[in-house]
Image (cartoon, rainbow, N blue to C red):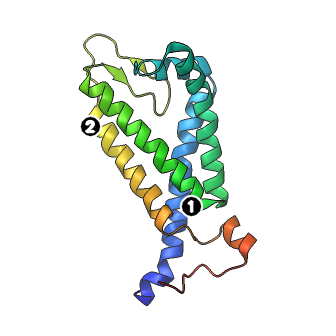
Amino acid sequence: MNANLRTWRPWLGLAVRLGLAVVWFWAGWSKVGDLAASGRSVNAYQVLPYDVAMVVGAALPFVELALGLLLLIGLATRLTAGVSAALLLVFIAGIASAWSRGLAIDCGCFGVGGELPAGETPSYLPEILRDIGFLALAGFLLIWPRTAVSADGALTGEPVEDDNE
């Protein structure tokens, strides 16, 4: 591997990790104040039974906040990136499903979502592209989870550089 890339990758990884942490904090914090509205946002996708959608909607902000915290401190980074990637794939599939079925909803990704008022047009493509970008960040951390300034590194005491690459 290029020595220059080897030097900068842990710091790039730190920026990626913190960037994805901000995304999860923002998403979770924007919904945690109104868990019922978060449940209604999930229900608007018309994929889950109402009661299940309400439970998922109430739990989702706490999952997002937990992912943000784990990424912020750099603990279990690869696992957290994997859960992030899986959740983002579910979000992308949900948005694509709503789009393909002709639903007119706000995704509720960063706040209260649900059915759009008559005449408003959903913005599915930008939402999917945004989530693909976040998925790329999670993918980076899946491949290179060892980043600078992380609890993972402090707990293992191992250098950040990967000697086997």
Q: Residues within 10 Å of mark 2 (few under 14, many from 20)?
A: few
Q: Amino acid at mark 2?
A: Leu
Where does the image place residue 67, in percent across and percent down from the top left? 60, 47
> Residue at position x 52%, y 20% from top?
53
Where does the image place residue 165, in percent across and percent down from the top left? 47, 83
User: Which of the marked residues, 2 or 1, is nearer the chain's N terminus?
Assistant: 1
Helix, strand or loop status at disc 1: helix
Helix, strand or loop status at disc 2: helix
Depth order, front residue of 121/55? 55
Res 140 quadrant in image? bottom left
Q: Return the residue found at the far bottom.
A: 3
Relative to residue 107, is residue 16 drawn left or right?
right
> Residue at position x 65%, y 44% from top?
66
The residue indicated by pointer 2 is 125
Numbered circle sitting on residue 46: none
In three-dimensional space, the C-alpha distance between marks 2 and 1, rounded to whole angstroms, equals: 28 Å
Tell whether label 1 touches label 2 (CB within 8 Å). Answer: no
Kindly report which numbered mark, 2 or 1, lies closer to the viewer in this rendering: 1
Where does the image place residue 23, in percent across and percent down from the top left? 51, 46
Q: Quadrant of the N terminus?
A: bottom left
Where does the image place residue 90, in percent across and percent down from the top left? 43, 38
Relative to residue 150, is residue 161 drawn left or right?
left
Relative to residue 90, is residue 159 drawn left or right?
right
Above or below, 117 against 162 in this view is above
The residue indicated by pointer 1 is 78
> Residue at position x 40%, y 28% from top?
107
> Residue at position x 37%, y 51% from top?
133
Above or below, 136 against 143 in this view is above
Above or below, 118 against 65 in this view is above
Res 17 quadrant in image? bottom right
Q: Amino acid at mark 1?
A: Arg
Q: Residues within 10 Å of mark 1 (few under 14, many from 20)?
A: many
